[in-house]
Image (cartoon, rainbow, N blue to C red):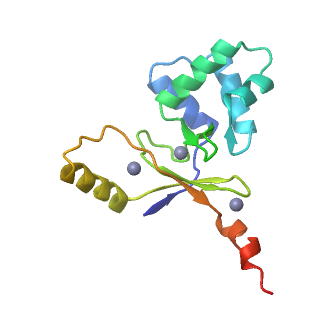
Amino acid sequence: MKIIKNNVNSLFVLSTLNRSGYRTTATRRKIIDAIFSLDNSFTVEDLIQNLPDLGRATIFRNVKVLKDLQIICQVFLDNGQSVYQLDFESSLESHHHHLICSKCKCIQEFNSGELEGLLRAVSEEMSFEIDTHRLELYGYCSSCKTSKPSDVQI
Ligand SMILES: [Zn+2]
Ligand SMILES: [Zn+2]
Ligand SMILES: [Zn+2]
């Protein structure tokens, strides 16, 4: 298993857009700057509020571009909502999963060859061709789990 560390900066994002044939317009730069200024995760509504001079449709369209290029990833919360965050690793097609802390709301990323192997085995055993999958783990991060009420010594 590999814990993915955040090594992405805005230069990487701009060069990824360029390489993929997208122009780095002033609008896109504004959206990217706003994403970097919001900490950890964000919703499209957060961006809309932070960028009042850009239209909703423009923001939605650009979020989709960033998601399709795997610059940002969509994280599904246990309340049925989803948020976005910058993908931690500066390489394209970095398939990974999320650990979501219920207390501080931090989101960590990891990938695991063993886990993917297990899913391939399920696919073979069930003769089911898996197109895509997602796995989000909910719980308490290393700094929050120590302060969980159940762990308090009496
Ligand atoms: Zn992610
Ligand atoms: Zn936490
Ligand atoms: Zn996976």
Q: Quick one: 151 or 23, which is closer to the camera? A: 151
Q: Is residue 78 visible?
A: yes
Res 8 → quadrant: top right
Left or right: 104 in relation to 83: right
Residue closest to the eye, 24 or 83: 83
Q: Is residue 147 visible?
A: no
Of 28 and 135, which appears nearest the observer? 135
Residue 80, position as x, y percentages in the image: 60, 40
In-image side of 24 versus 41 (left or right): left
Residue 12 place in picture, x, y as percent: 55, 37
**Could you tell me which quadrant the N terminus lies in?**
bottom left
Query: Quarter of the image holding residue 93?
Result: top left
Res. 153 image quadrant: bottom right
Q: Is residue 29 above or below residue 153?
A: above
Quadrant for the C terminus in the image? bottom right
**Point 42% across, 46% down: residue:** 95
What percent of the width, then of the height, locates residue 39? 73, 44
Residue 22 x, y percent position in the rendering? 50, 18
Compared with 31, 25 (above or below) is: above
9 shown above or below 120? above
Q: Residue at x 79, y 26 (%)?
A: 50
